[in-house]
Amino acid sequence: MAKKIRPEKKGKFNSKSDSKSGYKSKSDSRSNSKTRSNDRTNSRTHSPKSHSFDKGYQNGEQVEGIHAVYSLLNNGRKVKELLIDKSKSGSDHQNLAGLATKKGISIRYVDANYLRDLAQSFAPQGVIAFAEPINFASQDLLLKKKLIIACDGITDPQNLGSVIRTASCVGAGVVFPKQRSASLTATVLKASAGAGEIVPLLRCSGLGNWLTNMKKQGVIIVGCDHPSDFSVFDFSTEFYDKFNQVVVVLGAEGMGLSQSIKAKCDYIVHIPMNAEALSGGIDSLNVSVVCGIVTYQVARVLTKD
């Protein structure tokens, strides 16, 4: 059960209405369901067609987009082949081709329509690479991070990619379960803007058991959900000085934290919402936005910046 503590000072926007704030609600879930429905329609329109690819394409994990492919080429994973839209002549594509040539990677220049049909993401930006599967981090490597982001049922690939991108910027690792989670698809890696190649990523069998093991090692678990008794801004540097590591747990897009995961958290925090937003029916934030706000606040007090 999550512990309750008395905040050391109230946040600027704290009020009774704040307890209703957070980042997920039923209204948000309905809105998201419409968006996801539209996304599914778009994805069907632009989904890859069935091709009889030659052996150059049969084995390898697809990585798409300028930033994701550039990070791939620069961060150790073996790349089997690089496809470039032959109509692209900009500096980005020329630089990728030059880098691939230096590394001895095979390059094919193909038609734009062919590349789009092959793509798994909505807009591959004229470039697709095929690489060996990504190497997930070990528990020991992940534990070298003072801040870890845990994903509880985040199934939207764009959101998971954005979380990984934020983790890179804030210096955190990311853990997500093998079930009830988006996988590391081309869409996720593209949304991460290349961060998927450098952030320690761990896939665990069960997030609940993983959190239990982390608590046994003295790691503090902070869940993001609403309602809660205090905001993330109520924590002070002095509070976080008591801990060497913090895991921030983010919940699913529509449901927030599951009850079983919430019970594993030492503290539950919310992000205060402006009263005008609440009165207008805007009572939540996207999970990737929550990730940025909460992790930067935690990182700030952990590093005393």
Image (cartoon, grey):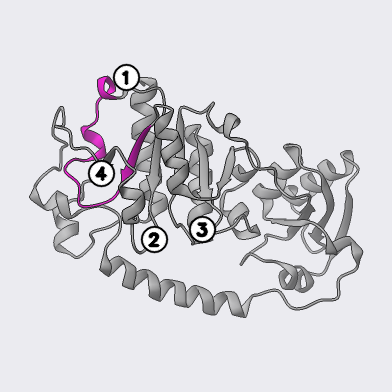
Q: Are marks 4 and 3 in contact (CB under 8 Å)?
A: no
Q: Earlier in the sequence, mark 3 or mark 1?
A: 3
- Residues drawn in magenta: 220-239
Give the image location of residue 227, x and y in percent: 20, 52
Q: Residue visible at 75% across and 69% down?
A: 118
- Labels 4, 2: front one: 4
Q: How many marks?
A: 4
Picture quarter containing residue 190? bottom right
Question: What number is the disc on residue 1?
Answer: 4
Instruction: Determine the CA span between mark 3 and mark 1.
Output: 32 Å
Instruction: Determine the CA span between mark 4 and mark 3.
Output: 24 Å
Amino acid tagged 1: Asp
What residue does disc 3 label?
Answer: 181
Q: Earlier in the sequence, mark 1 or mark 4?
A: 4
Apparent side of residue 166 relative to residue 268 in the rendered image (left or right): right
Q: Earlier in the sequence, mark 4 or mark 3?
A: 4
Question: What number is the disc on residue 241?
Answer: 1
Amino acid tagged 2: Glu
Instruction: Determine the CA span between mark 1 and mark 4.
Output: 22 Å
Q: Earlier in the sequence, mark 2 or mark 3?
A: 3
Apparent side of residue 295 relative to residue 195 in the rendered image (left or right): left
Q: Is residue 147 above or below residue 61?
A: above
Q: Residues within 10 Å of mark 4 (few under 14, many from 20)?
A: few
Amino acid tagged 4: Met
Instruction: Determine the CA span between mark 4 and mark 2.
Output: 22 Å
Q: Residues within 10 Å of mark 2 (few under 14, many from 20)?
A: many
Q: Quadrant of the N terminus?
A: top left
Indicate yes or no whether the magenta region holds residue 250.
no
What residue does disc 2 label?
Answer: 253
